[in-house]
Amino acid sequence: MNIIAYLFKSSLGKKYIMAVTGCCLFLFVVGHMVGNLQVFLGPEAINRYGHFLQSNPELIWPARLGLLTMVALHIWSAARLSVENRAARPVAYQTYKPMGSSYASRTMLMGGLIIATFIIYHLLHFTFQVQAINFTGQNFVDFTDAEKRHDIFKMIVTGFRNPLVSGFYLLSMSLLCLHLSHGVSSMFQSIGWKNDTYRPIIDKGACLVAGVIFLGYSSIPVAILLGFGKDVVK
Amino acid sequence: MNLTLKVWRQKNGQSAGHFDTYPARDVIEDMSFLEMLDVVNEDLIAAGKDPIAFDSDCREGICGMCSLVINGVPHGGHRGTATCQLHMRHFKDGETITIEPWRAEAFPIIKDVAVNRAAFDRIMQAGGFISVNTGGTPDGNAIPISKAVADKSMDAAACIGCGACVAACKNASAMLFVAAKVSQLNLLPQGEPEKHRRALAMVTQMDKEGFGSCTVTGSCEAVCPKEISLSFIAKLNRDYGIGALLGK
């Protein structure tokens, strides 16, 4: 077998694809969180950041296409492996106690599917700015600031003042946290960068990082629901 | 004590199976689980019924033949304990115990709760050996091996190939078994020259047999009667990955 066959056909190869694409997506999640947290610096910072990204299509489009490829490969390997794993146990146990395994490790597929649904909604909500699904009656495309830039600050505040939208966001972030608490440590295992010395550090570190990501993302809708930025929507 | 057993009965690999309920009377708490089953079988034979077919051999936890899923956990769920070393003192009077076979596509049922684990033998045939010219016995200590490395290799070699890892895994994955068998040789200088080829060949055979993949849940490690570490799977992933990259 050549390297392509080892990578795409074997179970281990698909786990490498899962781990490497998962790592890229994890790095995006960290970067996106840091970018988003600029909302707390006020309209000027976040609108300037948004304008910088939007006005450099030669940077943003390769990044978007790269991310899309990563998502596609991550989902493809998950789907293939899930089908194979189902086939590996055609008759289920009458009684089955999942000894020694965490809740997160057993819900990677379901959690991942819900997160994928969230990503589609999130893109329609803030990237494509489809008016029908923001449930505010306003068109986010029309929001511009004093310097004629897209007013991202106002869009975020308006969007998250809807408790349903914020609720779905918080639910998705908690599932993402659960997904990463297992996924981040597993990617080290899958690519073989783990041994008995590093294992406890990596496993605990993954939970810590997942927790930080949850707090970072959740802080935005929670702050907005508590009244942050309410002056701009008046 | 008196117990109720709910046991999976299946005539052979082709027929459909079902659960039957049997009483286990006057069980002594010092009996092993298999001895308890022996007593139940004696009663069944005396009553002219077909005894429960189950695997066992050494009955001292080193052969890897015994293989029962007891109340949903392979080997009953006591750390570092195989079914033959599981004693009845862990059960309560009046309890109902569910007994099922290892359930995996790669482990077809022979009869009742006895399964065919020849898939493991075929994985071993694919690379679980070292190629050496036979001849005179080599001198002891001719190849220096540090104590730490020898211990680690021995930890992997402790695997008795019972298949509890497959039975416990939600994906019926054999990764812990394959990782132990690859590592016991790959860690030592004698296994070094073939280490990548071995990892690639044994994983390829594992996939062919129809085992699932590793989701790192850790169930295998938790039920392993020899407490093989999950870290050996990381080592297998490393050896396989480097082997694939180097085109071995």
Image (cartoon, rainbow, N blue to C red):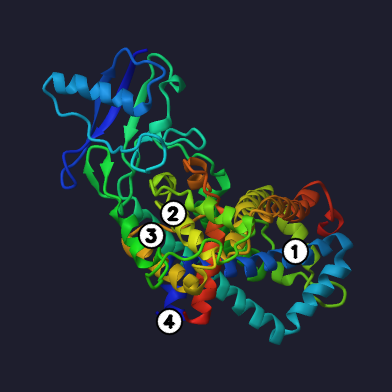
Q: Nearer the viewer, mark 4 or mark 3?
A: 4
* Element marked by disc 1: helix
Left or right of A100, for residue B6 = left
- The reply to whether the C-beta atoms of the residues labelled 1 and 3 are less than 8 Å apart is no
Q: Earlier in the sequence, mark 4 or mark 3?
A: 4
Mark 4 and mark 2: Cα distance apart in space = 25 Å
Mark 1 and mark 3: Cα distance apart in space = 41 Å
From the top left corner, tell me how far across and down residue A129 is, in percent: 65, 68
Q: Quadrant of the N terminus of chain B?
A: top left
Query: Are callouts 2 and 1 both on one chain?
Result: no
Q: Is residue A215 above or below residue B9?
A: below
Which residue occupies 83% across, 56% down? A234
- The reply to whether the C-beta atoms of the residues labelled 2 and 3 are less than 8 Å apart is no
- The reply to whether the C-beta atoms of the residues labelled 1 and 4 are less than 8 Å apart is no
Q: Nearer the viewer, mark 2 or mark 3?
A: 2
| Local crowd size for mark 1, using a 10 Å CA cut-off: few (<14), some (14–19), many (≥20) | many
Residue that badge 2 annotates? B177
Q: What type is the residue that disc 2 sits on? A: Phe
Q: Earlier in the sequence, mark 1 or mark 4?
A: 4
Q: Chain of mark 3?
A: A
Mark 2 and mark 3: Cα distance apart in space = 22 Å
- The reply to whether the C-beta atoms of the residues labelled 4 and 2 are less than 8 Å apart is no
Residue that badge 4 annotates? A2
Query: Are callouts 2 and 3 both on one chain?
Result: no
Residue that badge 1 annotates? A155
Q: Which of the pair B16/A139 is nearer the observer?
A: B16
